[in-house]
Image (cartoon, rainbow, N blue to C red):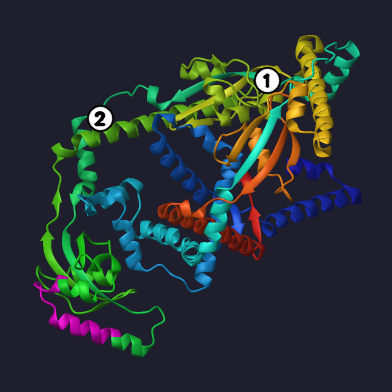
Amino acid sequence: MLQAMRNKMHGWPSIILLGVAVFAMSFFGMQGYLTTQDSNYVAKVGKQEITQQEFQDRMNQLRQQAAAEQGDQFDSSMLEKPEFKDQVLDAMVDQRLLLTATSDWGLRVTDDAIRQYIAAIPEFQLNGKFDPTAYSTFLTSQRKTPEAFESDVRSSLAAQLLPNAINSSALITTGQVDQFLALATQRRDLRYMVLPKPKSIDETVTDAQADTYYKAHLDEYMNPEQVSVKYIEVNGADLKLDEAPSESDLRKRYEDEKQRFVQPEQRLASHILIDVPANATPEQQKAALEKADKIAAQATPEDFAALARKDSQDAGSSRQGGDLGWLEKGVTTPAFDNTLFALKKGEISKPVLSSDGYHIIWLRDIRAGASKPFAEVRDQLAKEATTADRDRKYNEVAGKMTDETYQNPSSLDAAAAALDLPIKTTGLFSRQGGTGIASNPKLIAAAFSDDVMMQGNNSGLINLGDDHSAVIHVDQHVPAAARPLSEVRTDVDKRIVEERTVEASRKAADTLLARLRQGTSMQDIATETGATLQTAAEAQRSMPSAPAALLAQAFLLPHPVDGKPVYTVVDMPDGSAALLALDKVQPGDVAKIPAEQRTALRQQMAQAYASEATRELIAVLRSKVKIKYNKSLM
């Protein structure tokens, strides 16, 4: 081809044209080296990135947590809403800001705090004590090392250091509590009457009036844009496997993964901790070591627990006589680990230095490691092998479905025939969704996308949940259109009459309000209008002593002056109007509030003040750092 171009290009015009082409290719080629694509992050906080993988991991954690808490009531579509994802990402940005501030201000989470936090997690406990086997099983299921999990815990605890410090420093005075309680329990004496609706309302609505109202409220009478889609789906739960795993396959799996079923050696330990400050001076370090040496010299198995309760500065274990429970390698710090597993049963170590301080360790007992036999774990292996085979089968079918629908973008027929899958059809649904599969937010978004709805192409593979996906093709598209006036005329006429009624009710009530303010008594107006005058003595905000609309308005009115009532008109939910009089205001009797209620309120107020202070701190941190979002990767 190049030779053919060379044979046909002669003279200076051709040379110029070729030069321009070479320049263009050189320029755009170099541009590829000089520019970079967007990083794989969903948010960038200063120079720190929150990667797409980190965001997906957080979403998966929330999904698992919600599924565990809600059970059959769990609706995964809630987690796919853009506003929910925005909240999650904002929370991750706030956490990153707090972590940075914590580091900059020299705050840290000690190794001991991490160990205590992990040991207190209920899932890792057996009979009320930390169980290394449960911890190890969890780490295996999450495919995490102890170091990685501890790093996650450290970050989580570090992000709470500042909020916790703010919370602990929030002071609520007795006067503030009393002021709040006096307002919350304030009592107001009310009189009120709900006025009858005017009877002389013209209920005749002309065609012109209906047409004017209809056009002014056209957006309330629209049929939304709708589509129905054809789809093929693959669900891992419905796939039939070629064959069940054989006995030899299971035994091979057992041998390959035998390490999973080994109970590692465990050691029952107690310790005494002598704390060393983070920025300790040489004199402080020397003093701590001397104290630790002195305790170690006098410690014996018989009095170790008493010494721990007396001298250990580990608040978590000192109350239990220094008891740390059964430990296995990798749970504690390397220095602690190495010493513990070098001791003989009954021995007490010399002081061991870690980031927390000096530890004196007593090895109380040893539990040798052991392997679970094949027979004991066979069913587990079979279940795992079946799940793995089903996952492979699902990935294979989903991959073929993707290929077939991509190669034949205008129809699902070829893919359905190749995979022997039925083509199903939904009913019409709007952007708010429909029933069944049409309620899935991802499917709704795909159905109304330009490529699928307007261009008529197959969608990409839509992930509907665990091992469940579909590809859709629009079957029918119904554009948004206004419902004809003839179809909604009854509702239009009704609304016009209701508006006339509300307007007339308010006008009549305003006239009566003016008379009240001029000195006419409420009883006279009640007699005149046929309304019933009612009273609510010492009404409170939390007590339904009057209709909700009246009660809400009553506590917005100013206090009466010189014993003169304060009057107002209240619009009622049914379109009528009411006259309201506020006669007296009395503060709540704070002395009658039980002590436990006051204590609970003080704690709630402190938490509220601290939460607001934390929000203000985060707002300041946000203002000092450039934050960039890349929500297309969410």
Q: Nearer the viewer, residue 283 or 531?
A: 531
Q: Nearer the viewer, residue 494 or 118?
A: 494
Whether residue 39 sits left or right of residue 599 in the image: it is right
Position in image of residue 558 (x %, y %): 72, 48
Position in image of residue 424 (x %, y %): 53, 15
Q: Mark 1 touching mark 2, by CB under 8 A? A: no
Boundaries of the magenta span:
288-305
Q: Is residue 46 visible?
A: no
- Amino acid carrying label 1: it is Gln
For label 2, the residue is: 245
- Amino acid carrying label 2: it is Pro
Q: Is residue 196 visible?
A: yes
Above or below, comparing residue 564 to residue 501 in the picture: below
Q: Nearer the viewer, residue 61 or 378?
A: 61
Q: Which mark is residue 226?
A: 1
Whether residue 390 sits left or right of residue 257 in the image: it is right
Q: Is residue 141 magenta?
A: no
